[in-house]
Amino acid sequence: MAKRKLGIVCYPSSGGSGIVATELGLALARRDWEVHFITYALPVRLKGYEENVFFHEVQTDNYPVFHHPPYTLSLAVKITEVAETHGLDLLHVHYAIPHATCAYLAREMLKPKRLPVVTTLHGTDITLVGMQPSFHKVVRFSIDESDRVTAVSDFLRRRTIESFQTQRPIQVIPNFVDVDRFRPGAASHCRFRRAGEKVVLHASNFRAVKNVPAVIRAFAEAKDAAASRLVMVGDGPERWPAQTLARDLGVEDRVQFLGLQDGMEEILSQADIFLLPSEHESFGLAALEAMASGVAVIATTQGGTSEVIEDGVSGYLRDPHDIHGMAESLRELLRNDDLRASVGAAARRRAVEEYSLDRVVAVYQAMYDELVEAR
Ligand code: GMT
């Protein structure tokens, strides 16, 4: 049978939506799909040569009249070129803005050929950016025009319907994790763990929504429960303020900022506790990767994390403004090795049983098959 050909549009940076898109594309390529990534840079998790995987860089032409180069137009044109040259059967865009709109434009330009479009909503495209008055209408239009719409949690599905009054059915397909790669003991050469010391970890893009100060404050309050260190992975606008806060709270010698890192599976497998106190989190992929690695997670109550973590069993859920509550859970986990081990084991079990790559990729594949056959 001829290979089915899928175009994927995503952000190439280290955010969760780009990671999900890349891991999905790689998994499909290993299941005999031909996968074409279309974006402005190589996605962070697309490393080395992979059979059946192609990368098409979008280049934007500029002109002195433009304040900003019109990426949206260049992306729409690139999609049509890839669709025509490689005979795409289907296009899957991740993060509505501007990708769902570019997909709509490309689909119109390709007529009378038909290119079915799937849009996956990830979170801030709906809860933050999409709510801005200059985007709201076009996000709603682009959702309504997609052939299929998926959301990564039921929270996000409900929020999309409330905020955009869309009539389009939205299928919840949760995020997933490769449980063979993200597993306890995955570390081979990255060994930052010191003997006799517990590692508390936070990883994010250090945006305001991640509530990074709460990580530092909760750690500062709980740190003396055991010999411990806070390791901060990632980069973004809140990184320097967080370093200043660690100094102001007198914990800078116990907090280490690693910046952007590859090989999260190795880093996570050396952590004991993972903190994700975001203002809201539509899913919390970073928390799921920690869970698969057998790490006890303390995450926000706000958003879709409560669909992933069962409070008090496979992790803890705390209000993002309840620093004392977070510190209390952290203290308990730092002090009590048996509790930490049992929460970590339950987290790993939940990741394997509900969110494994094989299970979730099969759901995407079934949806693609339906769309391609209908075409
Ligand atoms: O969290 C971010 O700022 C990045 C953002 C993205 O789109 O890259 O993450 C969103 O999508 C992830 C993948 O589906 C989800 O796991 C995150 O929860 C979601 N972030 C928020 O809702 C804040």
Image (tube, rainbow, N blue to C red):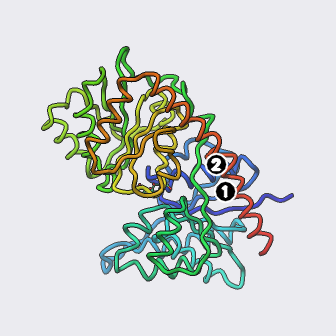
**Disc 1, disc 2: CB below 8 Å?**
yes
Q: Residue furthest right?
A: 1
Residue at horizontal 46 percent and vertical 39 percent from the top: 312
Q: Which mark is residue 256?
A: none
Q: Nearer the viewer, residue 40 or 237?
A: 237
The verdict on label 1 being within 8 Å of ligand 1 is no
Query: Which amino acid lies under the numbered mark 1 shown in the image of this protein?
Result: Val
> Could you say whether the residue bearing mark 1 is in a helix, strand or loop?
strand
> Could you say whether the residue bearing mark 2 is in a helix, strand or loop?
helix
Dot 2: few (<14), some (14–19), or many (≥20) neighbours within 10 Å? Answer: many
Indicate the quadrant of ligand 1 in the picture.
bottom left
Residue 336, percent from left and from top: 40, 23
Residue at horizontal 87 percent and vertical 58 percent from the top: 1
Q: Nearer the viewer, residue 97 or 56?
A: 97
Residue at horizontal 44 percent and vertical 49 percent from the top: 14
Quadrant holding the C terminus: bottom right
Q: Nearer the viewer, residue 318 or 229?
A: 318
Q: Is residue 71 left or right of residue 214?
A: right
Dot 1 corresponds to which residue? Answer: 35
Residue 23, percent from left and from top: 59, 49
Q: CA distance from mark 1 to mark 2?
A: 8 Å
Residue at horizontal 38 percent and vertical 49 percent from the top: 300
Query: Which amino acid lies under the numbered mark 2 shown in the image of this protein?
Result: Leu
Q: Residue furthest top?
A: 195
Residue 129 vs 184, above or below: the answer is below
Dot 2 corresponds to which residue? Answer: 26
Q: Residue furthest front?
A: 312
